[in-house]
Image (spheres, helix red, strand yellow):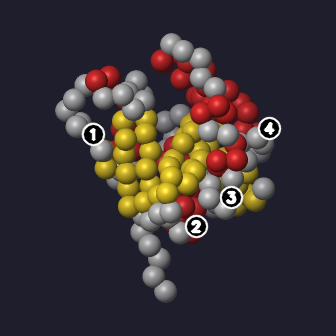
């Protein structure tokens, strides 16, 4: 685990999905998905924790006072594309720009590991996430005028800035 204290906000902790600090966030995420979609969700069955481990993946938490307030992960989709997953802000800490901070941290991390593109999907019953990704410069890979429920998972992509020597 590596923690990076940011002068402008929460500490970014590079850790694993199995870190006990992550459990409250992931439990709340699971509960939210179940409530919105009406079916139980098993995040570990969808993708094993190893999918978010280095060198091809990452899992980050934002900590305030040592407590997790937000987090997210990416996994390898292909040689140049990382797929963002499990981006979540604890319900007591919403509307503070923390999800945007998670996105920026994941974007920096993916760029540092050689990825040139990000891909993600969000559910049709998650308008907050859809708005976040659009505001953060992600391009929708679906018709924005179509009813979200008619599409299913809503895919987005974003090219990453590549660093030049």
In space, the residues marked 1 and 2 are separated at their CA atoms by 28 Å
The residue singled out by tag 1 in the image is 142
**SS of the residue under disc 1:** loop
Count residues near mark 4 (Cα–Cα under 10 Å), then give few for <14, some for 14-19, many for 20+. few
The residue singled out by tag 4 in the image is 20
The residue singled out by tag 2 in the image is 113
Count residues near mark 2 (Cα–Cα under 10 Å), then give few for <14, some for 14-19, many for 20+. some
Q: Residue furthest top?
A: 38
In space, the residues marked 1 and 4 are separated at their CA atoms by 36 Å
Q: Residue furthest bottom?
A: 165
Q: Which of pointers 1 and 4 indicates the residue nearer the eye?
A: 1
**SS of the residue under disc 3:** loop
Q: Find residue 133 and report its image quarter.
A: top left
The residue singled out by tag 3 in the image is 54
Q: Residue at x 22, y 37 (%)?
A: 143
**SS of the residue under disc 4:** helix
Q: Earlier in the sequence, mark 1 or mark 4?
A: 4
Q: Residue at x 80, y 38 (%)?
A: 20
Count residues near mark 3 (Cα–Cα under 10 Å), then give few for <14, some for 14-19, many for 20+. some
């Amino acid at each position: 685990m590596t923690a990076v204290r940011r002068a402008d906000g929460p500490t970014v902790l590079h850790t694993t999905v199995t870190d006990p600090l992550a459990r409250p966030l992931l439990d709340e995420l699971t509960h939210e998905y179940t409530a919105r979609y009406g079916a139980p969700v098993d995040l570990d069955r969808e993708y094993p924790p190893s999918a978010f481990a280095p060198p091809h993946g990452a899992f980050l938490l934002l900590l305030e006072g040592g407590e997790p307030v937000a987090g997210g992960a990416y996994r390898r989709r292909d040689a140049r594309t990382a797929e963002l997953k499990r981006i979540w802000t604890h319900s007591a800490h919403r509307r503070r720009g923390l999800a945007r901070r998670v996105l920026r941290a994941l974007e920096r991390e993916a760029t540092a590991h050689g990825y040139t593109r990000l891909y993600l999907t969000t559910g049709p019953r998650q308008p907050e996430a859809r708005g976040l990704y659009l505001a953060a410069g992600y391009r929708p890979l679906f018709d924005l005028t179509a009813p979200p429920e008619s599409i299913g998972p809503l895919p987005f992509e974003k090219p990453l800035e590549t660093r030049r020597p």
